[in-house]
Image: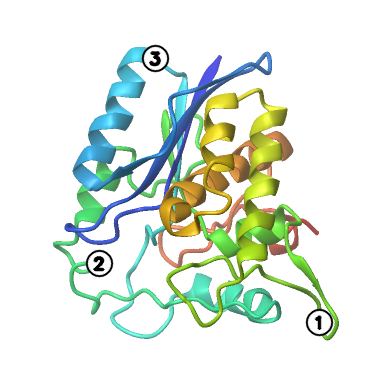
């Protein structure tokens, strides 16, 4: 049995692009990378994932995407954002609310919805009938769940300040810390091509941010699937009804 595991740092709007990376996982433990991360808009991402499915014929496809997949509220935060904002803020992180009033991102005509429909939409991912499974994935929650936070004197741990677009808060050492953690995951899986791509961007954060997030999602996906840990998500509220507990998602 094989699984296509895809990390997509999402394009968010029709004009933008995000990092896309994929690997094929076998039940026997073997992994095959599908090349280094590429910059892709929604149309290209859909085309590449469908081509991977055609060529490798996986038993199922798991898509980890950094963009809300269920947005029913017209304003304010979604229930899932109310749930996760506390553990994120305790580690000096923040999150942007998703609501349908954000035109181009979450209104009825936003490109995310047609993209998701190609891969099973936001159906219950643990159903045995689904061959394509979509998980909304928070980079900061993935970092917390994997135990990749940094020590902090006041709050025990903090999230790495890894975003080079935020020059006032960006720390190069934090970026390299995250790169090293992801490199080790891909090295453990024998995925040398992706490992080499990340290693080449350890000192060039501005060139690797989107691709690194795609790699982060794949790392988290491998870990979460091995542990059989559910993610907080659900069609009506954004919270998965049958998730074990938020503490499991956060690695507790």
Specify which label sits upstream in the sequence, 2 or 3.
3
- At 23% from the left and 32% from the top, the residue drawn is 47
Marks 1/2: CA–CA distance: 34 Å
Marks 2/3: CA–CA distance: 31 Å
User: Secondary structure under badge 2?
Assistant: loop
User: Secondary structure under badge 3?
Assistant: loop
Task: Examine the rendered structure and indicate whether residue 143 appears above or below residue 84.
Answer: above
Marks 3/1: CA–CA distance: 46 Å
Task: Examine the rendered structure and indicate whether residue 161 appears above or below residue 111.
Answer: below
Q: Is residue 249 visible?
A: no
Front disc: 1 or 2: 1
Query: Which of these two is toward me, 219 or 128?
Result: 219
Q: Which mark is residue 105?
A: 2
Front disc: 3 or 1: 1
Please state if 133 lies on the left or on the right of 169 as rendered: left
Please state if 115 lies on the left or on the right of 197 as rendered: left
Query: Which of these two is toward me, 55 or 83?
Result: 55
User: Secondary structure under badge 1?
Assistant: loop
Question: Horizontal and vertical percent for residue 233?
Answer: 51, 58
Task: Examine the rendered structure and indicate whether residue 68 appears above or below residue 84.
Answer: above
User: Residue tagged by mark 3?
Assistant: 57
- At 17% from the left and 57% from the top, the residue drawn is 14
Task: Examine the rendered structure and indicate whether residue 193 appears above or below residue 74.
Answer: above
Please state if 41 lies on the left or on the right of 122 as rendered: left
Query: Which of these two is toward me, 86 or 230?
Result: 86
Specify which label sits upstream in the sequence, 3 or 1.
3
Specify which label sits upstream in the sequence, 1 or 2.
2
Figure quadrant of the C terminus: bottom right
For the view shown, which residue lies furthest in the front direction? Answer: 203
User: Residue tagged by mark 1?
Assistant: 155
Q: Tags 2 and 3 in contact by the CB under 8 Å rule? A: no
Q: Tags 1 and 2 in contact by the CB under 8 Å rule? A: no
């Amino acid at each position: 049995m094989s699984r296509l595991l895809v990390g997509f740092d999402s394009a968010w709007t029709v004009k933008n692009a995000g990092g896309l990376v994929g690997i094929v996982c076998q039940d026997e433990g073997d992994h095959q990378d599908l090349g280094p991360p590429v910059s892709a808009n929604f149309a290209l991402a859909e085309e590449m994932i469908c081509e991977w499915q055609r060529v490798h014929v996986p038993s199922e496809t798991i898509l980890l995407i950094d963009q809300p997949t269920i947005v029913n509220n017209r304003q304010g935060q979604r229930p899932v954002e109310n749930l996760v904002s506390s553990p994120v803020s305790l580690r000096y992180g923040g999150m942007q609310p998703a609501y349908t009033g954000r035109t181009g991102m979450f209104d009825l005509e936003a490109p995310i919805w047609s993209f998701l429909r190609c891969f099973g939409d936001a159906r219950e991912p643990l159903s045995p009938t689904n061959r394509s499974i979509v998980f909304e994935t928070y980079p900061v929650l993935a970092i917390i769940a994997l135990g990749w936070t940094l020590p902090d004197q006041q709050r025990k741990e903090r999230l790495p300040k890894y975003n080079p677009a935020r020059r006032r808060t960006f720390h190069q050492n934090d970026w390299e810390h995250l790169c090293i953690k992801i490199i080790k995951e891909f090295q453990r899986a024998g995925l040398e091509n992706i490992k080499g791509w990340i290693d080449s961007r350890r000192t060039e954060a501005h060139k690797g941010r989107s691709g690194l997030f795609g790699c982060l999602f794949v790392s988290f996906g491998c870990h979460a699937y091995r542990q059989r840990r559910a993610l907080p998500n659900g069609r009506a509220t954004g919270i998965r009804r049958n998730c074990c507990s938020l503490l499991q998602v956060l690695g507790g």
